[in-house]
Image (cartoon, grey):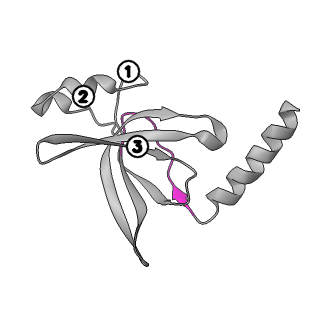
Amino acid sequence: MVNLLKKFENKQIDVLATGKKVDKFTYGDTVKVNVIISEGTTERIQAFEGLCIGRKNKGLRSSFTVRKISTNQGVERTFPLYSPKVESVTVIKKGIVKRAKLYYMRNLKGKATRIAEKINITPK
């Protein structure tokens, strides 16, 4: 029974992930999420760029939370990963963090909210 559910879920993930550009990202990364916004009969794409402070990997129910500072006010949004409204997720910067959930970032202000960037140095 569980195996049947996993097969069905994997098929649904394949269907929902086609045509979507999602980079591999994890918590601590700065990501840019393009979301489709419907306003009446028109649709437009809105970008939401911020720090990924948490990610839940639960198959079809996977989601991630992005936090940004907008006019000195913290704004968080949780996006379902396989939602038809999420068009693409691109990684802007890779971060170095030691925790899986970065909820402590909610209490920090100013320069304390900076995260070290992971730099790839290729040997010559």
Q: Position of residue 23 (x, y in %)?
A: 50, 51
Characterize the local packing of mark 3: few (<14), some (14-19) or many (20 or more) Cα atoms within 10 angstroms: few
Residue 29 at x, y percent in the picture: 37, 40
Q: Secondary structure at mark 3?
A: loop
Q: Nearer the viewer, residue 104 or 5?
A: 5
Q: Which residues are magenta?
A: 20-30
Left or right: 5 as drawn, with respect to 121: right
Kindly report the distance in space between the C-alpha atoms of the residues bearing marks 3 and 2: 35 Å
First along the sequence among labels 1 and 3: 1
Asked whether the beta carbons under mark 1 and mark 3 sit within 8 Å of each other, the answer is no
Nearer the viewer's eye, disc 1 or disc 2?
A: 2
Which residue is label 3 attached to? 122
Inter-mark Cα distance, 1 to 3: 24 Å
Residue 106 is labelled as 2
Membership of 21 in magenta stretch: yes
The image shows residue 72 at horizontal and vertical percentages of 11, 42
Q: Amino acid at mark 3?
A: Thr
Q: Residue at x 71, y 55 (%)?
A: 14
- The reply to whether residue 8 is visible in this rendering is yes
Is the residue marked by circle 1 packed among few (<14), some (14-19), or many (20+) residues within 10 Å? few
Q: Which residue is mark 1?
A: 98
x and y percentages locating residue 1 in the rendered image: 89, 32
Choose the circle earlier in sequence order: 3 or 2. 2
Q: Quadrant of residue 19?
A: bottom right
Contact between labelled residues 2 and 3, with CB atoms less than 8 Å apart? no
